[in-house]
Amino acid sequence: MAEAKAKSKSFSFPTAYTVLFVLSLIMVSLTWVINSGMYSKIRFDSITSQFHVTHPDQSVEVYPGSQGSLDELNVKLNVSSFTNGEITTDIGIPGTYTVVESNPQQLMAALEAPIEGMYSAIDVVFFVLVIGGFLGVVNASNTLNAGIQTLARNMVGREKWLIIVVTSLVSLGGTTFGMYEETFAFYPILIPIFVAAGYDSLTGMAAIFIGSFIGCTFSTINPFSTIIASSAAGINWADGIVFRSLLLVVSTALGITYLLRYAEKVKADPSLSIVADRMDSFRQKMMGQQTGGAELVLSGRQKAVLGVFAATFGVMVYGVITQGWWFKEMTTLFLGASIVVAIVSRIDEKTYVTELVKGANDLLGVAMIIAIAKGIGVIMNEGMIGDTILFAGSELVAGMNKGVFVLTMMGLFAGIYLLVPSSSGMALVAMPIMAPLADSVGIPREHIVNAFMYGIGLMCAITPTGLTLPALAMADVPYDRWLKFIMPLLLVLIAITCVSMLVYLYAF
């Protein structure tokens, strides 16, 4: 008996790499048991102003770029959504699903998937590596160490405001411009600040992540979720915005309260931290000289570096919100900022290159996790089972009671998001197929859009194929411990969301 207990206690949850590789193997297996199938796809050619329809047999038909063509094809969308550039990718045509010749993937596909995933996610991967390099250059002058110590001293007695302010601002960013991938830039900066303030690395990571997934779940004007999904459903993005805004406020307040309770408990007794046994290694790896030594004070040059540092993040947010920046522009910004920091700090060329590479190496593991996660979607696409899963879902909900229908749709979207962890990509793939089902049940299509956003948003909190595992890697938090921490909050949010959807469906 004692020996059995010892073996049980020695069990260690697999790393993120192993979890994702196992999921890759599961996806390979699914391509052997799920029929391959495809919907006919329609795409607008902006050069010729025509619609090109590609059928499952790869034959192509050309239609005039008019509303009449969409009506003829039973695509319930406004032609302006295509002509003004809101929809630029292939859209599935309802009622055209066809079983095609199966393309089961071999075991080798699970090994090739991370490589293919790296190709498809190279913009995100390089952004993460350059962020690491930028931080490496900033750290070369010991600026962050001194700055964090100074901030921690000034925050004594007011540490909880770190949680309140960070979570609120990130939630605001999530609901307005879909701040999700962009938060990668904040994890290596803010987590050490939380640790220096007396919390653990999980608190810092959760303050950012909870704000992000709640903000994205209850999106108000998020162009990558609300606007694209509404456009693909053929409705105005403002439909239901008041109710979503109310849920946003309630859920953000609930998330902050939940995190504050945990954080204050850890601050009072660090041994109660879920990651107590990993904090020493985290400090050594991510916080360098903050593990000991003399108290640091900011010099004039270090203050100048902090000014460049803060300005860089300000410019990034401005560019994303107003200039349409994405990973290429953000990566360029941080690479350029690293050079400016080196000049201000008077770092010589050889030291600059060494620290840039060393900093990138610190986040190489995170970049690899992103690539492996992306590879799972590659396997699904090569096996051509995505449309089959979508078709099965549409058949499942057809003819349901409207209350059961909206809740099932939310769960269905959550499940599909596990396979297609992209809000905009999934909206364009699923919404043209699923939105017309609302008409058959007799409810406004905005309920489908809400079910879509709530389902994928809440799934963001735990899905290993999205950005959860890379974020956890930044804080050195094992996936099983994250589940232990986040599940109580997630279950409450799911309950509140389900009740709210039913109230909104039947009372308004």
Image (cartoon, grey):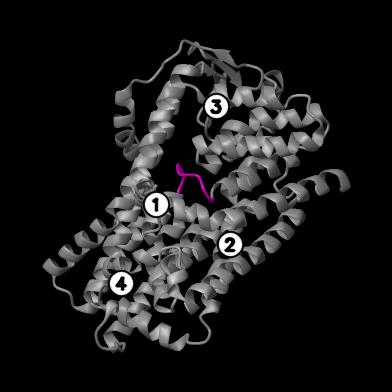
Nearest the viewer among 77 and 66 is 77
Mark found first going from the N terminus, 3 or 4: 3
Q: Position of residue 342 (x, y in %)?
A: 22, 72
Q: Which circle, 1 or 2, is nearer the viewer?
A: 1
Please say whether residue 158 is one of the residues in the magenta stretch.
no
Asked if disc 2 and disc 4 are in contact, CB closer than 8 Å, the reply is no
Image height of 504 relative to 235, above or below: below
Mark found first going from the N terminus, 2 or 4: 2
Residue on which the image places disc 4: 287
Asked if disc 1 and disc 2 are in contact, CB closer than 8 Å, the reply is no
Asked if disc 3 and disc 4 are in contact, CB closer than 8 Å, the reply is no
Hey, what amino acid is under mark 2? Ser
Q: Which circle, 3 or 4, is nearer the viewer?
A: 4
Secondary structure under tag 3 reads strand
Image height of 485 relative to 234, above or below: below
Hey, what amino acid is under mark 4? Met
Magenta stretch, residue numbers: 461-467
Mark found first going from the N terminus, 3 or 1: 3
